[in-house]
Image: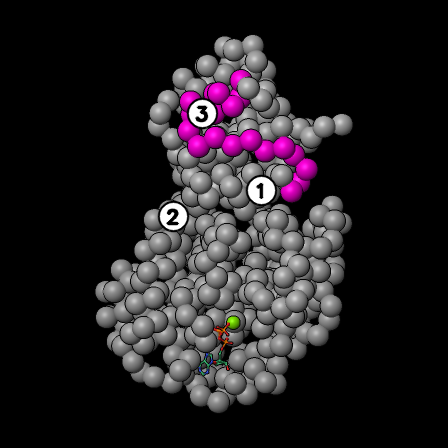
Amino acid sequence: MSAQRILIVDGDQASLKYLAYSIGKAGFEAYTASAGKEGLIVAWRERPHFIVIDPVNFNDISIVELYHKLRNDPRTAKQPIIVFTSAVDPQAAQQATQLGFDHFVVKDSEALPTLLDIFQGKAVSAGAAAPTFQERTNTRMGKTIVFLSAKGGMGTSSLCANLGTMFAELFTQKKVAVVDLVLPLGSIAPIVGYKGPLNICEACSMPPEDVTVDYLHDSLPDTGLWKFQLLAGCADPHTAEELNVAQIPGLIQKMKQAFDYVLIDLGRSLSRISMPVILDADQLVLTIGPDQSTVTLTKTVVEYLRIRGLQNMQIYPLLNRAVGLEGMITSKIEEILGLSVTAAIPHIGSEFVLANNLNQPLSYKLPDNVATIAFRQAAQEIERRAQEVREKGFKHI
Ligand SMILES: Nc1ncnc2c1ncn2[C@@H]1O[C@H](COP(=O)(O)OP(=O)(O)OP(=O)(O)O)[C@@H](O)[C@H]1O
Ligand SMILES: [Mg+2]
């Protein structure tokens, strides 16, 4: 049986190439067009089984006109047309279905599995009982809190692990998981003392249907004193090279279904792998140090994230004086970044390293330390902001 043909029409080259590559890997034959009229030509020539269109990224023809031209030509009258966009407006889905599009898929971390379900006939069309965009964003999904830094050595992994413990201690009824996505070598496992074989490389090499929500619940190791379950990072660079990155979005999606809080260490990575995770985060914790070069680099990162549609409410700058410097004053950092900095973890010298070396969370080793208190406040604030992001619908860029 020959592969199903999928046409993707998107003016955003990165998005176009990534989707074509991913669906090609999944066994479909991808055709691409970077503008509406080119899309029409390819559609009529190739007669794809499905047509995926991002209406935002081209303007040579309106989406309404493109839709009618496709529908009024016998070669493309019946093929399902999928709107695939990063539109923030929740009403966009409703408008798209009213126009007659078959599906509306948001460019977020669950986009690829959703599209594959549609191509494989597993998804119901938008006109029928399929969950709407609004319903989908309201379904009970764990909150993702993503940790990123513009520079290495800022304490991102230590902060991610310790905040994971804080979340578990503050919200005792909730299930907390930490995911280490730092490539090629994860560092959360050594921090918490996990030496087992289950890690991100392993999880991504399994058939996706085997990595169920129940599997994640049951198989991800408990970390003892740390009180969260861990999806460890790659344990050696060689395995990291083999990492099946196409599985990551689906895996994160299942993590969100399995846990109430999913904290993800991304290290310094702004890549094709990490960007969808960042754009889908309820909170992006940006670890910064109080030195000029870190703040300048962080400013560049923040500007880029704003262009990609992240709102200030989604970004939480966390000042960590990991390097033992008083350095720049907070107000100066705030001015440069255009963000308020409400939390700072003090430099606690060798105590931090010692706790890490003993594989102990700070709240256990030093329960009354100022750093522990700062972690607690930060965790509370991050949860409050994540909740606000959910309620106000900032998410889904
Ligand atoms: N507030 C702090 N006070 C003292 N030491 C700290 C503090 N924060 C982090 N450290 C120490 O700094 C070192 C680097 O921390 P960590 O590995 O968490 O940073 P990172 O940003 O994840 O680094 P990488 O870029 O390698 O991923 C560790 O030894 C850690 O114990
Ligand atoms: Mg790290």
Residue identifier under label 2:
308
Tell me what residue is drawn at x 45 percent, y 76 percent.
153
Q: Which residues are magenta?
A: 25-44
- The alpha-carbon separation of the residues under discs 1 and 3 comes to 19 Å
Local crowd size for mark 3, using a 10 Å CA cut-off: few (<14), some (14–19), many (≥20): few
Quarter holding the C terminus is top left
The amino acid type, in three-letter code, at marker 2 is: Arg
Q: In this rendering, is residue 235 above or below 372?
A: above
Q: Is residue 169 magenta?
A: no
Q: Quadrant of residue 365?
A: bottom right
Whether pointer 3 and pointer 2 mark residues with C-beta atoms closer than 8 Å, the reply is no
Q: Position of residue 352 (x, y in %)?
A: 50, 84
Quarter holding the N terminus is top right
- The alpha-carbon separation of the residues under discs 1 and 2 comes to 21 Å
Sequence order check: which comes first, mark 1 or mark 3? 1
**Can see residue 257?**
no
The amino acid type, in three-letter code, at marker 1 is: Tyr
Q: Position of residue 146 (x, y in %)?
A: 49, 60
Sequence order check: which comes first, mark 3 or mark 2? 3
Tell me what residue is drawn at x 34 percent, y 49 percent.
307
Q: Position of residue 301 (x, y in %)?
A: 36, 60
Residue 380 versus residue 19: which sits nearer the camera? 19
Residue identifier under label 3:
38
Q: Is residue 29 magenta?
A: yes
Q: Which mark is residue 21?
A: 1
